[in-house]
Amino acid sequence: MVKIGIGSDRTCHDWKSLLSSYEKHVTPDSVVLEIGASNTKRTKDLSRLCRRLIGIEIAPERVPEDFDNVTYLVGDWQRLSEIVDADSVDLAVSSHVLEHVPDDLRAVNELHTVLKPGGIGLINTPNRKRVLRALVESFTGERKFPYWEHQREYAEEDLVSLLERSRFQRYQILPVAFGLLGGPVYVYSETVPERLRKYANFWEMHLFKR
C-alpha cells in the first residue's frame, strides 16, 4: 500500500513489522526478553502474549516499575549474560538499540548466549542508505559516525558482515517500508520492491539459535 499526505505520519512501521513478526513466534509459555524496554505501551503489547517478560534498560532513570508478568533489570546489552541466565530466553526483541551499542558484535553474541536452543532474536535498526539519506548524501557525502546517539548505522552488507562474524549461523534480513517518512510531506510504500530493497527505511533481522 502506498500512502501520500501532508503532515507527519505517526505510524511506526518498524515497530508494527517487528510486532507482527513477534506474534508469529511467541507462545503463551514463552519467556521473552526486551532489550531497550523504556516504552511501557510497547512492553505491554509484548507481555500480553507471553508467560514472562524481562525488560532490560541501560539507564536506571528510564526503568519503569515492574507490572503483571514483567520484570525490569538494569543492564548493558554487551554484558547481557551477567544478568540473564544462559539458555533461558525463548524470544528476544530489540527496537532501535543496536545502532547505539559500542560493540555490536559482542552484543549479538551475548544475545546468542542467553537464547535457548531454538530461540529467536528479532531486531530492527534504521537503514544507513534509506532513500532520503541516500539522496542527501549524494550532495553532502556520507555521514560520519558516531553521530548524535548512534555509534553507526547499517547498510544491508554491514549487517551481513556483522552476522557472518557472529555465533548465529542462521539469520534473515528483511527490508521495512520505502519512501519519505517523518517530514512535512510523506510518500511511502509499506512494502519494499525488491529492486529498491537497498533503499528501505529500516532493516529487521531474525536471528535463529540452533
Image (spheres, rainbow, N blue to C red):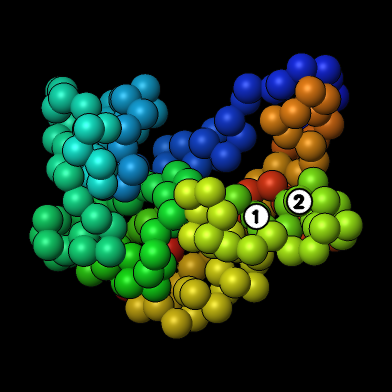
Q: Residue at (59%, 72%) from the top-left corner? A: 158
Q: Label 1 is placed on what type of residue?
A: Asn
Q: Residue at (25%, 41%) from the top-left corner? A: 59
Q: Residue at (79%, 23%) from the top-left corner? A: 184
Residue placed under numbered mark 2 in the picture: 133
Rendered location of residue 155, percent (x, y): 66, 65
Q: Label 2 is placed on what type of residue?
A: Arg
Label 1 vs label 2: CA separation?
9 Å
Horizontal side of residue 23 vs 154, given as left or right? left
Q: Residue furthest bottom?
A: 165
Q: Residue at (53%, 48%) from the top-left corner? A: 148
Q: Residues within 10 Å of mark 2 (few under 14, many from 20)?
A: some
Rendered location of residue 55, percent (x, y): 23, 40
Q: Is residue 24 visible?
A: no
Q: Quadrant of residue 110?
A: bottom left
Q: Residues within 10 Å of mark 1 (few under 14, many from 20)?
A: many
SS at mark 1 in the image: loop
Q: Quadrant of residue 209?
A: bottom left
- Quarter holding the N terminus is top right
